[in-house]
Amino acid sequence: MIRDAKGGPFGWALDAYIGWKFRSAFRGLWVRGALPEAGPGRLVYLNHANWWDGFMLHQLSRVAGWDGYCLMEEENLRRYQFLARIGAFSIRRKDAVSSVESLRYAKQLLRRPRAALYVFPEGEHRPFGELPLRLERGVELLARVARVECVPIAVRYTFFEHELPDVLLEVGPGHPPGPLEVFQAGLESVVRRLMAVTSLEGFTQKVSGARGVAERWDAVRGASS
């Protein structure tokens, strides 16, 4: 098992780099729905749509005030081991002993005051909006072991009328642990709501990113008029 390695000079430098990288690649991070305030540990489960998800979660933790951690397949974490510096730790899903060790470690993390543990219950990247979702039982087992509030969040990377994409998050209501069907319904509900979005109306910008050529040109024209 690979444990997280948050903090230290390299971790702080990586924090700054990821923030810069995210802001330069996207127009912004937009949220609809209430993000729970930092408090007792919570399990946050999301659809897994993009390689950028890890960087997005780093930014989400900062704006929400959460101490974020992410459960990640060990083969992938070995490939991108720097992600341990921002809270990733590993699980080998086909190894029962390793899975139990990871679940115990996750339970310890969730005892921390502001902890948020991110889980992608699909277990792999899938195109946004591909329904029904195929969730694995790990999220149900983890929730039952940890006994914490569970919060569904849908993630969508999309272009509207701008040069750069936006990242949209739809936050659903929190709920207690339950059977897998509860997680299926919770995540599909927020995904369906996000599928219907055609503009940023109703969303709040939490991270401001880069502006495209047209936006910069409009700003210059506005200043000169």
Image: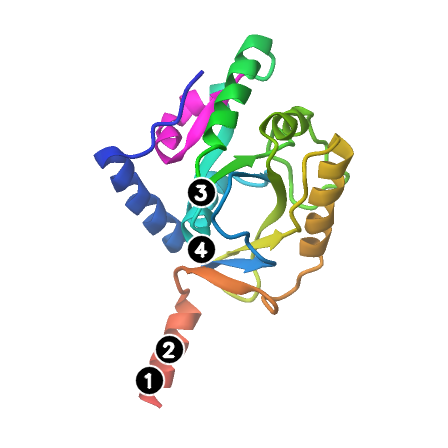
Q: Tell me the kind of residue under disc 1.
A: Ala
Task: Name the residue carrying label 4.
Answer: 26
| Real-space Cα separation, disc 3 to disc 4, in angstroms | 27 Å
Q: Nearer the viewer, residue 40 or 102?
A: 40
Q: Residues within 10 Å of mark 4 (few under 14, many from 20)?
A: many
Task: Name the residue carrying label 3.
Answer: 114
Classify 153 as above or below 91: below
| Real-space Cα separation, disc 3 to disc 2, in angstroms | 39 Å
Q: Nearer the viewer, residue 183 or 18?
A: 183
Task: Give percent across and percent down for residue 221.
Answer: 37, 83
Q: Nearer the viewer, mark 3 or mark 4?
A: 3
| Residue at x 51%, y 15% (from the top left corner) | 101
Magenta residues (range): 76-92
Q: Tell me the kind of residue under disc 3.
A: Arg
- Are the residues at dot 4 and dot 1 in contact (C-beta closer than 8 Å)? no
| Residue at x 32%, y 43% (from the top left corner) | 15
Q: Quadrant of the C terminus?
A: bottom left
- Are the residues at dot 2 and dot 1 in contact (C-beta closer than 8 Å)? yes
> SS of the residue at dot 4?
loop
Q: Which mark is residue 223?
A: 1
Task: Give percent across and percent down for residue 203.
Answer: 57, 64
Task: Name the residue carrying label 2.
Answer: 219
